[in-house]
């Protein structure tokens, strides 16, 4: 984890969700064009959907080739089968992976159906290490400041681990389920330590309801109570947001 030293934080405010998505997609496509073998850290949720749509458009035009790219997703619910519409595995297939030429064997996501969650976490850690770490990590931010599923109070030094989701997170994600009670209580997430090891981080946020937590994360004290605040210490953080 880089503490102190030379942090370069670039913040781009964009006019709307579409422009946020285009700007973020531009940064990702520049990475892939310059470094075709990049390891991309990817996120699910509502915020990155427009980024994926834009990348798919450019892929369709022949402007980006993902054939050598590896992807590492941040997180997955425990106990939700990969084929289920609520799984992050299915989400990634539907919104991105099935629409571009990323090789299935190159697309990685934690297995939330494992019977040995500790072994799965260690497998994921080893995989990230074997790939040489993440070159560009795309992140959204939760209303409570979480990144991945690293909830407030999470230790900054954690690697991939199983988390109990906060009630606020389960309520925020209830829109993808029949009710908030159906949202799983646990998830596997990449840890903050690994997120901070990424060579570059791209944080995106959109909507009025994200502005306060984004401001706290970028300009407030660095504290586990706002997990995203640790990103202030990253040497190459780019933030793209719209109100
Ligand atoms: C998703 C993830 C989460 C989301 C965050 C924001 O893989 O790791 O941290 O980025 O919950 O979600 P949305 O974009 O739905 O507001």
Image: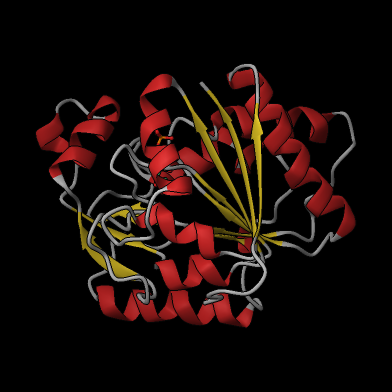
| Most distant residue in the left direction | 181
Where's residue 21, x and y in %? Answer: 64, 29
- Does residue 9 appear to the left or right of 158 in the view shown? right
Closer to the camera in the image, 239 or 181? 239
Where's residue 189, x and y in %? Answer: 36, 61
On the rendering, which quadrant does ligand 1 occupy? Answer: top left
Closer to the camera in the image, 194 or 234? 234
Residue at x-position 26% and y-position 49%: 80
Where's residue 93, x and y in %? Answer: 54, 41
> From where the camera sits, is residue 180 visible?
yes
Quarter of the image for residue 176 reads top left
- Does residue 54 appear to the left or right of 60 in the view shown? left
Question: Is 56 above or below relative to 184?
Answer: above
Residue at x-position 63% and y-position 33%: 51
- Does residue 109 appear to the left or right of 54 in the view shown? left
Look at the image and name its color scheme: secondary structure
- Does residue 73 appear to the left or right of 10 in the view shown? left
Question: Is 205 above or below relative to 18?
Answer: below
Question: Is 6 above or below relative to 34?
Answer: below
Question: Is 110 above or below relative to 183?
Answer: below
> From where the camera sits, is residue 53 visible?
no
Closer to the camera in the image, 186 or 4? 4
């Amino acid at each position: 984890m880089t503490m102190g030293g030379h942090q370069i934080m670039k913040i781009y405010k964009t006019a709307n969700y579409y422009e946020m998505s285009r700007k973020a997609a531009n940064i990702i496509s520049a990475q892939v064009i310059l470094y075709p073998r990049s390891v991309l850290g990817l996120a699910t949720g509502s915020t990155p959907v427009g980024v994926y749509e834009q990348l798919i458009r450019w892929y369709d035009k022949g402007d980006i080739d993902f054939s050598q790219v590896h992807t590492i997703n941040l997180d997955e619910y425990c106990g939700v089968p990969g084929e289920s519409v609520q799984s992050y595995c299915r989400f990634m297939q539907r919104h991105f992976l099935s629409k571009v030429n990323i090789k299935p064997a190159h697309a990685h996501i934690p297995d939330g159906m494992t019977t040995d969650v500790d072994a799965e976490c260690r497998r994921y850690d080893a995989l990230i290490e074997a790939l040489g770490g993440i070159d560009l990590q795309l992140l959204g931010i939760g209303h409570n400041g979480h990144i991945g599923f690293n909830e407030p109070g999470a230790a900054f030094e954690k690697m991939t681990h199983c988390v109990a989701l906060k009630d606020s997170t389960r309520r925020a994600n209830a829109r993808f389920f029949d009710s908030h009670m159906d949202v799983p209580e646990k998830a596997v997430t990449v840890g903050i330590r690994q997120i901070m090891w990424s060579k570059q981080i791209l944080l995106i946020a959109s909507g009025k309801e994200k502005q306060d937590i984004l401001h706290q994360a970028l300009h407030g004290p660095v504290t586990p109570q706002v997990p995203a605040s640790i990103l202030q210490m990253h040497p190459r953080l780019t933030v793209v947001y719209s109100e």
